[in-house]
Image (cartoon, grey):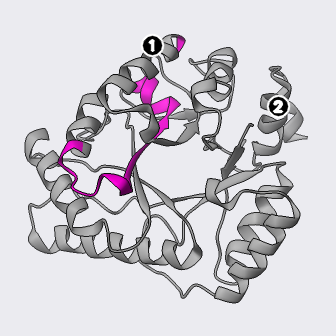
């Protein structure tokens, strides 16, 4: 079974119904959203009536809600405790986000591990573990640590760093991983050897911990540490390698989420990229078709 979708919007008025309708317009059978703007703390109450309506529509469209994912805001940085107030803010805001997801019935939340901002990796990983242990277990929501590109002082650009964090987390039932193909490639993992990467992941962490995969091509060569997403088949990873990831039997029941850029910052590519993925056939003229 292929679970394929993209990042979609979530607004104050339509909330989950609006997210679902956007996803359906792309031919998706799953999706990912933020419960508010990823760059700030402004949030509004979750409307349970809208949520119920969305769940009814999902049933009518055979969408498995357990495969729908939320992404935590970018502004949460558990790695930084230079100022106690900032660390406490990150912990408390993450708690609030998990509570909102619990109200929505969402089970998996993707989180960037954080950036050490000069503290060093050892201290940063210790801070992340501390923060996660303060947050997890309050509600039945699992945090998925996203694999990162290694830009700047990012933590989580190697499987070993992800493993170290998970090893330190007390509540193992509520911690998992989100693979990002662009980030993996940019951090130095060759996606041509994806099966070997999964074998390594399984030995280090356990493949059962993978709960989501972000499907993105990369504007950069392997190991560039830049994190610049590209449309499917138009980057340095390439269509065939990404298809191998998407249809890998070991990840068959894991939701695959597109975070590829809008064309000319205006046109969403997801409907067309999903068609290519379902057909397993690359269209080199895709971007021109979308512009029309």
Sequence-wise, the earlier of marks 2 and 1 is: 1
Q: Which is more toward the observer, 187 or 136?
A: 136
Kindly indicate whether the residue at mark 1 contacts the one at mark 2 (C-beta within 8 angstroms).
no
For the point 83% across and 70% down, which residue is it?
57
Q: Is residue 173 magenta?
A: yes
Q: Residue 207, relative to residue 67: is it above or below?
A: above
For mark 2, does the 10 Å Cα neighbourhood hold few (<14), some (14 to 19), or many (20 or more) residues? some
What residue is shown with label 1? Answer: 196
Q: Residue at x 35, y 28 (%)?
A: 225
Q: Residue 278, located in which quarter of the rendered image?
A: top right
Mark 2 vs mark 1, CA separation in Å: 24 Å
- Residue 106 at what x, y percent from top left? 56, 66
Nearer the observer, 155 or 152: 155
Q: Quadrant of residue 78?
A: bottom left
From which residue to which does the magenta span run?
167-192
Quadrant, the C terminus? top right
Q: Which mark is drawn over residue 167?
A: none
Residue 147 in sight here = yes
Question: Would you name the residue on which mark 2 appears?
Answer: 278
Q: Residues within 10 Å of mark 1 (few under 14, many from 20)?
A: few
Identify the secondary structure beneath mark 1.
helix
Residue 271 within the magenta-colored segment of the rendering: no
Badge 2 element: helix
Q: Nearer the viewer, residue 53 or 229?
A: 53
Image x and y of residue 182, in percent: 50, 30
Residue 127 horizontal side relative to residue 59, left or right: left
Q: Which quadrant: the N terminus?
A: top right
Residue 189 shows up from this direction: no
Up-down relation of residue 3 to residue 199 (above or below): below
């Amino acid at each position: 079974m292929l679970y394929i979708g993209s990042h979609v919007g979530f607004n104050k008025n339509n909330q989950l119904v609006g997210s679902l309708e956007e996803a359906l317009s792309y031919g998706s059978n799953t999706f990912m959203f933020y419960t508010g703007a990823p760059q700030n703390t402004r949030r509004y109450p979750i409307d349970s009536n809208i949520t119920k309506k969305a769940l009814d529509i999902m049933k009518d469209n055979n969408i498995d809600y357990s495969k729908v994912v939320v992404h935590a805001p970018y502004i949460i940085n558990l790695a930084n405790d230079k100022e106690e107030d900032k660390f406490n803010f990150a912990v408390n805001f993450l708690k609030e986000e998990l509570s909102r997801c619990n109200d929505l019935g969402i089970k998996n939340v993707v989180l960037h591990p954080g950036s050490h901002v000069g503290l060093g990796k050892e201290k940063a990983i210790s801070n992340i573990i501390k923060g996660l242990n303060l947050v997890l277990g309050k509600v039945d929501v699992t945090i998925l640590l996203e694999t990162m590109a290694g830009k700047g002082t990012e933590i989580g650009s190697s499987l070993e760093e992800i493993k170290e964090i998970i090893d330190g987390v007390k509540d193992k039932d509520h911690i998992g991983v989100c693979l990002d193909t662009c980030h993996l490639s940019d951090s130095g993992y060759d996606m041509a050897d994806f099966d070997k990467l999964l074998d390594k992941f399984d030995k280090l962490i356990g493949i059962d911990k993978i709960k989501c995969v972000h499907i993105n091509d990369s504007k950069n060569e392997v190991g560039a540490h830049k994190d610049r997403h590209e449309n499917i088949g138009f980057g340095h990873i390439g269509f065939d390698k990404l298809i191998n990831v998407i249809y890998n039997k070991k990840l068959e029941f894991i939701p695959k989420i597109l975070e590829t850029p809008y064309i000319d910052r205006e046109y969403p590519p997801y409907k067309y990229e999903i068609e290519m993925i379902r057909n397993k056939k690359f269209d080199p003229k895709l971007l021109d078709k979308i512009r029309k």
